[in-house]
Image (tube, coloured by chain):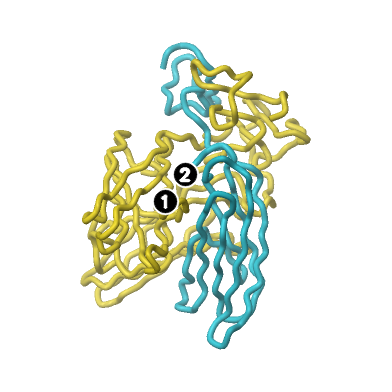
Chain colours: A cyan, B yellow
Amino acid sequence: MADYGTKISSPGVSVLTAADSQLRLTSKRKCLKVAAPQQTDITTVFGGLFATGSGSLGFSLAFIPVVIPFINYAGAIYIMPFVNLDLSFTQAYHFVDSNSVNFDVTTDAAATVNIYTYLSETERVI
Amino acid sequence: MADYGTKISPVSTNVLSAVGSDLVYSSRWSNFKLHSVITKTVSIPDGDTGAFDLVDNPIPYAPMHLPFCESTTTIPGKWRFGTMAGTLFMPDDLDWASVGVRYRPAPDNDFLLFVSHFGAGIRTFTFKIAIFVDSPQSAGAAIPSVGDFGTKTAGPGLNVLTALDYQLAMTSKYQSLTVATDTSVTAVAPSTQATYAHGLGYVPIFLPYIRVGSVAYPIPSNFEDHSVIHHAEGWISNTTLYVDSACDGSTSHTFDFLIFNERLV
């Protein structure tokens, strides 16, 4: 890159000669900036064969942001969307519209699950 | 935003007037701080349709992570997100049935990797998980430090001198996740597939989405369009991003995605 802007290198790497790929941060490359993860608790209700529940996380932005949610269920953490590995009914999906992240969760029995969501207020999907 | 903290704008953008989406960096938000990319292969024996294995988490708490998987035997060089979420096949490997990654907290503190495949012979799958210092549970812990030097920034209300790595907005101890491309491609009906040449020359970390109306669904995932549930897939090589709506081809679909500069392979 041209020799101007902001560059930060790691210990042992000269910031003056480092390639972009060696820099920890450079004003040539935009960081994915995220807010602290927010927790949404969803309680599923048993309906005879399995239990379902839904929830949402609202936001007020002029675009549809990057979101990365994780679900904490039965002592394990999965990045969403996911379907459980043990052939149970457990699954969790999400989608993002213009003002909220929407979660749909299915479990074998009634349960309360925790969803932790990273949301970027600066980087957009749409 | 409040007029304090550290802000970095790109060339020709006034840092004083730039909004958050214009900034390269701002201490108002956190960067994802890349710790490492861990690798584990899982082989399905001949005659079996599934296998699993474990790989240790290199940091002592639940990390932000992005898992990816390659069917090394059948379609090498193409990496998809490491969750399956409802499909029964990959568009270019119809025998690939499912894949999953589960983080198991302490005392296990590891990842359980699962894959199923209906093909014949020994089939090897390679998992790569990008591990970040950040924690979705906001319950991180100290990681052995390289020392009290370098550049660190903390968000408002946090003492940069005492903050743990996962609490920092940015630290030169770890690589920040940076955006190489954020754009879209459209699969024009009757085709359900589209490609994008990313030009990086290596396999990067990426996040793909399919757009339905004004809603974004992450992929792989199920999505509803015209009251029909479909399943979209995305995978990436060292040259190209591939996406597939797996629809009937009656409707064009747009795929949005972020490709990062940071290397997966």
Q: Quadrant of residue B52?
A: bottom left
Q: Are marks 1 and 2 in contact (CB under 8 Å)?
A: yes
- Between the C-alphas of marks 1 and 2, the distance is 8 Å
Q: Nearer the viewer, residue A36 or B57?
A: A36
Above or below for A71 versus A111: above
Q: Residue at x 23, y 59 (%)?
A: B92
Q: Quadrant of residue A11?
A: top right
Q: Residue A8 at what x, y percent from top left?
A: 55, 23
Instruction: Kindly indicate whether the residues beneath marks 1 and 2 are on one polypeptide chain.
Output: no
Q: Residue A125 at what x, y percent from top left?
A: 47, 44
Q: Chain of mark 1?
A: B
- Would residue B222 be seen by someone viewing this image from the given angle? no
Q: What amino acid is at disc 2? A: Val
In the shown orientation, is residue A23 left or right of residue B45? Answer: right
In the structure shown, which secondary structural element does the residue marked by tag 1 occupy?
strand
- Would residue B47 be seen by someone viewing this image from the given angle? yes
Q: Residue at x 52, y 66 (%)?
A: A92
Above or below for B90 versus A124: below
Q: What amino acid is at disc 1? A: Tyr
> Residue beneath label 1, please?
B209
Q: Residue at x 25, y 73 (%)?
A: B46
Above or below for B55 versus B164: below
Q: Chain of mark 2?
A: A
Q: Residue A79 at what x, y percent from top left?
A: 52, 58
> Residue beneath label 2, please?
A125
Q: Residue B1 at what x, y percent from top left?
A: 68, 30
In the structure shown, which secondary structural element does the residue marked by tag 2 occupy?
loop
